[in-house]
Image (spheres, grey):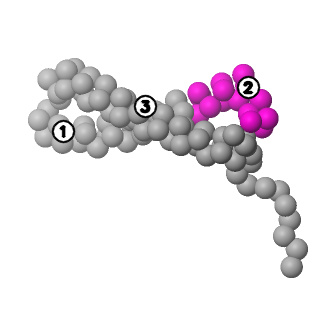
């Protein structure tokens, strides 16, 4: 396999990883919300829980994705295996 196909598979795998992390965090936060927060929260505020949990799951998964990617970049020389997405070639008219 060449660098371009490695890059494509890496992006595909990273996207699937990010989606799985987001879904797992959403499920965990929903379970924690229904178990611990709903019993003590007034009923009129229950509606706000799910949108807040959804946004929190996206934000936390973004930071988890960045952390894992930074650790991967520290451990392995990624430029050896992947081609850059954007080149630095200057376009002359």
Asked if the stretch drawn in magenta spans residue 63, the answer is no
Q: Is residue 59 above or below residue 74?
A: below
In terms of sequence position, does the residue under pointer 2 or pointer 1 come before the other? 1
Q: Residue at x 54, y 37 (%)?
A: 14
Q: Nearer the viewer, mark 1 or mark 3?
A: 3
Evaluate whether residue 67 shows in this view: yes
Q: CA distance from mark 1 to mark 3?
A: 27 Å
| Magenta region | 66-81
Q: Residues within 10 Å of mark 1 (few under 14, many from 20)?
A: few
* Mark 2 and mark 1 residues within 8 Å of each other at the beta carbon: no
Name the residue that disc number 3 marks: 21
Asked if the stretch drawn in magenta spans residue 76, the answer is yes
Image coords of residue 53 (percent x, y): 32, 36
Q: Quadrant of residue 31?
A: top left
Image coords of residue 34 (percent x, y): 19, 26
Image coords of residue 67 (percent x, y): 59, 28
Name the residue that disc number 2 marks: 76
Q: Is residue 10 above or below residue 29?
A: below
* Mark 3 and mark 2 residues within 8 Å of each other at the beta carbon: no
Q: What element does badge 3 sit on?
A: helix
Name the residue furthest left.
43
Q: Nearer the viewer, residue 12 or 63?
A: 12
Q: Residue at x 24, y 37 (%)?
A: 49
Left or right side of 27 for 61? right
Indicate which disc residue 56 carries. Answer: none
Q: Quadrant of residue 19?
A: top left
Q: Quadrant of the C terminus?
A: bottom right
Q: Nearer the viewer, residue 60 or 44?
A: 60
Name the residue that disc number 1 marks: 45
Q: Nearer the viewer, mark 3 or mark 2?
A: 2
In terms of sequence position, does the residue under pointer 1 or pointer 3 come before the other? 3
């Amino acid at each position: 396999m060449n660098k371009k196909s490695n890059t494509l598979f890496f992006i595909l795998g990273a996207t699937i990883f990010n989606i799985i992390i987001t879904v797992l965090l959403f499920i965990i936060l929903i379970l924690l919300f229904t178990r611990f927060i709903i019993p003590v929260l007034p009923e009129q505020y229950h509606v706000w829980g799910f949108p807040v949990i959804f946004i929190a799951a996206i934000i936390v998964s973004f930071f988890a994705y960045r952390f894992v990617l930074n650790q991967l970049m520290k451990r392995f020389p990624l430029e050896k295996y992947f081609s850059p997405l954007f080149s630095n070639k200057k376009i002359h008219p």
